[in-house]
Amino acid sequence: MSFDIANEAPSLQGILNRTYRGRLILKDVKVGAYDSNWIKEYELFYSKQPHSKPFVKRLIFKDKSIYTGFVHVRPVSDAHKVSETFLSPPREKRDDKNCFITCGNSYNEYGEPAVFCAPFIMPETIFGMCIHGSIWISLKILERRQGQRVEACDIPKIQNMAMGSPYTDQDGLKFSKASRILRMCNCNSFYINNIENPLGTRIDDEKMIYTLYAYVESGLPVIIGVDTRDLDYLEDLRSDYHSIVAIGHTMTDGKVDEFIFHDESNLPLRETK
């Protein structure tokens, strides 16, 4: 079955063009696939919307003949149709000499073949903003960590744990609430707020980078709050709060030169200093 990605899911087209350099080939489309996030979004809001269905389309991709994973595409959306995404990193990011993803694991979700990846999602803004997507990504990564019993949750449940309602009204969450949600899901979590800390207790940039490196090197994702003006890959330089998830880093001559992020509102596997 054919699927017009550019027209039906432009956000996915951006991911394929910019993250995977147009190399992925759509090999199969499974209509009526189950997606744990979408089914909850459908039950809570979209069941009465025109053209809405309780299932998604599962797009299966390959890089040449190699299975790369799949992307779920929502039938309708208020923001992005890209739902749960399990795609292995591009081939250049799988080269240990240049770059490696420290938080990836082997996922065989929904009965599909196993794929080594760090899961990604683009939130429905009715139920979640960038911070909710960051929490979802972190929980999906951590649920596969040995010795932990982390509970991964759909995005409406994450918002419900924070506010007692599954609806965001397009508002984000403070890091204190994000940290609490992670602890409620059996994670060891804490947060550092350099903006609110007195000048004498702030962590300088060098120490912050070393701290970030230590966690991602240990295979632990780190949610980072940033000003969008500080993200060198964004064309819109308006000041705004945003959260992204550090999932790895690149290396040159044995030294870290850039970190790798999942940006839930933009693209997965972004590299920035």
Image (spheres, helix red, strand yellow):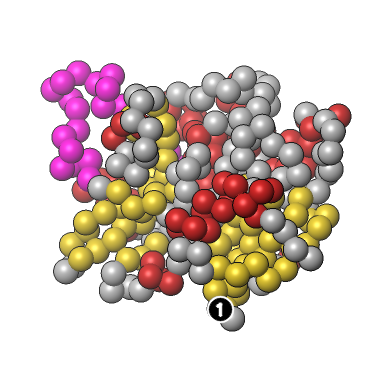
Residue furthest out toward the left: 200
Q: Please provide percent x and percent y for residue 219.
A: 39, 57
- Is 192 magenta? The answer is yes
Q: Residue at x 60, y 47 (%)?
A: 10
Left or right of 157 on screen, residue 196: left
Q: Is residue 47 above or below residue 108?
A: above
- To which residue does mark 1 refer? 64
> How many numbered badges does the structure rendering display?
1
Q: Considering depth in this image, is 34 or 62 the residue closer to the camera?
A: 62
Left or right of 53 on screen, residue 112: left
Q: Main secondary structure of the magenta part?
A: loop
Classify 10 Å Cα crowding around label 1: few (below 14), some (14-19), many (20 and above).
few
Q: Quadrant of residue 50?
A: top right
Q: Residue at x 30, y 48 (%)?
A: 272
Quadrant where the image shows the N terminus: bottom right
Q: Please provide percent x and percent y for residue 69.
A: 61, 66
Q: Residue at x 69, y 56 (%)?
A: 4
Q: Please provide percent x and percent y for residue 215.
A: 33, 51
Q: Please provide percent x and percent y for residue 61.
A: 62, 67
Residue type at mark 1: give it: Lys
Q: Is residue 97 above or below residue 38?
A: below
Q: Quadrant of residue 166?
A: top right
Please state the extent of the stretch shown in magenta in the rendering.
186-209
Q: Residue at x 15, y 42 (%)?
A: 206
Residue furthest out toward the bottom: 65
Q: Is residue 109 visible?
A: no
